[in-house]
Amino acid sequence: MNKTKAPAQQKHKAFSKKNNRTKVDIPLLVLFNKPYDVLSQFTDNSTPPRPTLANYIQMPDVYAAGRLDRDSEGLLLLTNCGKTQKKISDPKFKAPKTYWVQVEGDITDDALAKLSAGVQLNDGPTLPAIAVRMTEPAIWPRNPPVRYRANIPTSWLSLTISEGRNRQVRRMTAAVGFPTLRLIRAQIGDWQLADLAPGESRTIKLRADQP
């Protein structure tokens, strides 16, 4: 495997079923630490354009397997293999995803129990999850910094879910009374963020039977 820092931006083809091939000679998986405020796509039509994956990933013909919100950070997987992409991103495969979540307030045992059992959202109840209190992880400072409210403490939890609804983690913590301040995805299935710094990536050659 190799580890690379953010390269200069280059033109990247838009995703399509045609260019995201089901089978490739050498299936690759790119583990990328997506910085805050970066879109999980290679193009953006806004004026001025917002930062995208093209600012960091030079490798041709790789595409994001799933998404990570612009205001979230951490592990995003990309691949050149359509079969691999489907197994990672398709909800029916239920690849567990672990997030480190900083919330406003001191998270309670009752809130953790509710998150673990599943909470009611406006699009239905969530599946059971794994929610545990954690100490603040040894991570990079966010740019821009998180905005705190004076005299209100914050706390961290690790939350593992097997769904992929829109802004699900943020909605879950809000539903139990603890709004999310910072959200970092640390793991997808067996793949971990490990020591990747924001903007860095690691490329792995997969076996034909992976993942």
Image (cartoon, rainbow, N blue to C red):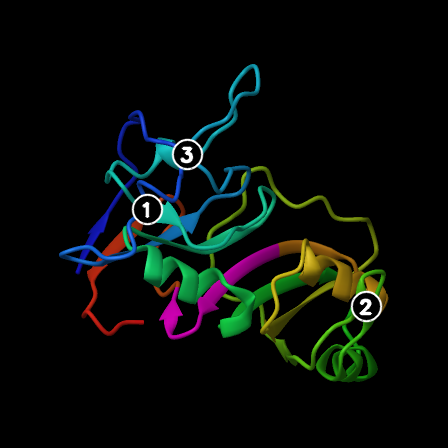
User: Which tag, 3 or 2, sits closer to the chain's start?
Assistant: 3
> To which quarter of the image does residue 52 belong?
top left
User: Dot 3 corresponds to which residue?
Assistant: 42
The C terminus: image quadrant? bottom left
Say what amino acid the circle numbered 1 marks.
Asn
Tell me if mark 2 has few (under 14), some (14-19) or many (20+) residues whose alpha carbon lies within 10 angstroms of its own: few
Instruction: Return the residue nearer the eye: 127 or 82.
Output: 82
User: Dot 2 corresponds to which residue?
Assistant: 124
When the figure is inspected, residue 161 is found, relative to residue 85, above or below; the finding is below
Say what amino acid the circle numbered 3 marks.
Phe
Instruction: Return the residue nearer the eye: 87 or 41.
Output: 87
Instruction: State yes or no: residue 118 in magenta.
Output: no
Instruction: State yes or no: residue 185 in magenta.
Output: yes
Task: Tell me where the magenta segment starts and ends, as one range.
Answer: 183-192
- Look at discs 1 and 3 and give the one toward the viewer: 1
Say what amino acid the circle numbered 2 marks.
Gly
User: Which tag, 2 or 1, sits closer to the chain's start?
Assistant: 1
User: Dot 1 corresponds to which residue?
Assistant: 20
Rendered location of residue 17, percent (x, y): 38, 44
> To which quarter of the image does residue 70 belong?
top right
- Furthest toward the top, the residue is 47
| Residue at x-position 29% and y-position 26% | 10
Q: Is residue 2 left or right of residue 142?
A: left
Tell me if mark 1 has few (under 14), some (14-19) or many (20+) residues whose alpha carbon lies within 10 angstroms of its own: some
When the figure is inspected, residue 122 is found, relative to residue 200, above or below; the finding is below
When the figure is inspected, residue 58 is found, relative to residue 127, above or below; the finding is above
Q: Majority secondary structure of the magenta segment? A: strand
The N terminus: image quadrant? bottom left
| Residue at x-position 67% and y-position 54% | 166
